[in-house]
Amino acid sequence: MTIRPVTITGEPVLHRRAAAVEDFNDELRELVRDMYETMDEAHGVGLAAPQIGVGLRLYTYHYANDDGVPERGVVVNPSVTLGKVSGAEPDPDDEVEGCLSVPGLSYPLKRAEWVRVRGFDEHGNPLDFEATGWFARVMQHEYDHLDGKLYIDRLDGRWGKRARKHIKNAGWGIPGQTWMPGVDPDPFGH
């Protein structure tokens, strides 16, 4: 297992649709192990393959939930069906999201409170489960990565403006920038 560098917004792989996984082989399972190790070292609740520079449709997660789903897993070639997203303003205390590829920043974002996730595990076995609350948020966040979207792309109004300003001031938004979990300072202070 290897901890891999986490790509920062501006890296092209983060901003394009990832390719479907075609082979459920030892190479895929090694990638999944590396993703778990990287996610754990970065103190993340999820990690999509594009976040470590791999343009494939899979993500790992580690989140305790009340939905009867194992708290640690991988979803390969997922499809996600969303419940309704409220039109209300996001709560700046209870609906704040962050991302390992936008290190250290967090902004309020409204998400669906329920999703259905279908896909496969790393062995090609089918998965089909529902997620609610913050677990649903994690599933939506990671799935967005596979379509080339970061949560900051979904921010409206003042939050989007603030995010763009922070990204510009940090010098991000260009290819080639990464941070290394376990080596670089933890951007979220864990």
Image: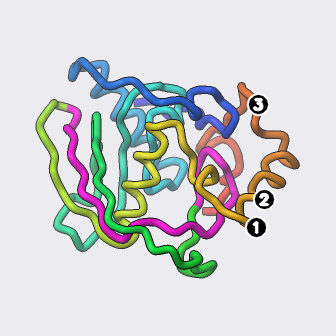
Q: Which residue is mark 2?
A: 161
Q: Earlier in the sequence, mark 3 or mark 2?
A: 2
Q: Which mark is residue 158?
A: 1
Answer few, some or many: residues within 10 Å of disc 2's Cα (few below 14, many 20 plus, some between 14 and 19). few
Quadrant occupied by the N terminus: top left
The disc placed on residue 174 is 3
- What segment is highlighted magenta in the picture? 98-122
Which residue corresponds to the image point at 21% horizontal and 58% vertical from the top-left? Answer: 70
x, y percentage for residue 64?
A: 31, 67
- Is disc 2 placed on a helix, strand or loop? helix
Label 1 crowding class (10 Å Cα cut-off): few <14, some 14-19, many 20+? few
Question: The disc labelled 3 sits on which kind of residue?
Answer: Ile
Marks 3 and 1, the one that precedes in the sequence: 1
Is 154 on the left or on the right of 62, as rendered? right
How far from the left and from the top, in percent, is residue 113?
A: 36, 71
Q: Is residue 158 magenta?
A: no
Task: Please say if the residues under marks 3 and 1 sit with CB atoms less than 8 Å apart.
Answer: no
- Residue 145: x and y, percent? 48, 41
Between the residue at mark 3 and the residue at mark 2, the CA separation in whole angstroms equals 18 Å
| Cα distance in 3D space between marks 3 and 1 | 23 Å
Looking at the rendered structure, the kind of residue marked 1 is: Arg
Task: Write down the quadrant of residue 25 in the picture.
Answer: top left
- In this view of the protein, which residue sits in the foreground, 75 or 62? 75
> In the image, what residue type sits under mark 2?
Lys
Disc 1 + disc 2, Cβ < 8 Å: yes
CA separation, marks 1 and 2? 5 Å
Q: Could you classify mark 3 by the number of other residues whose Cα lies within 10 Å: few (under 14), some (14-19), or many (20 or more)? A: few
State the SS at label 1: helix
Res 79 quadrant in image: top left
Q: Residue at x 16, y 46 (%)?
A: 127
Which label lies toward us, 3 or 1?
1
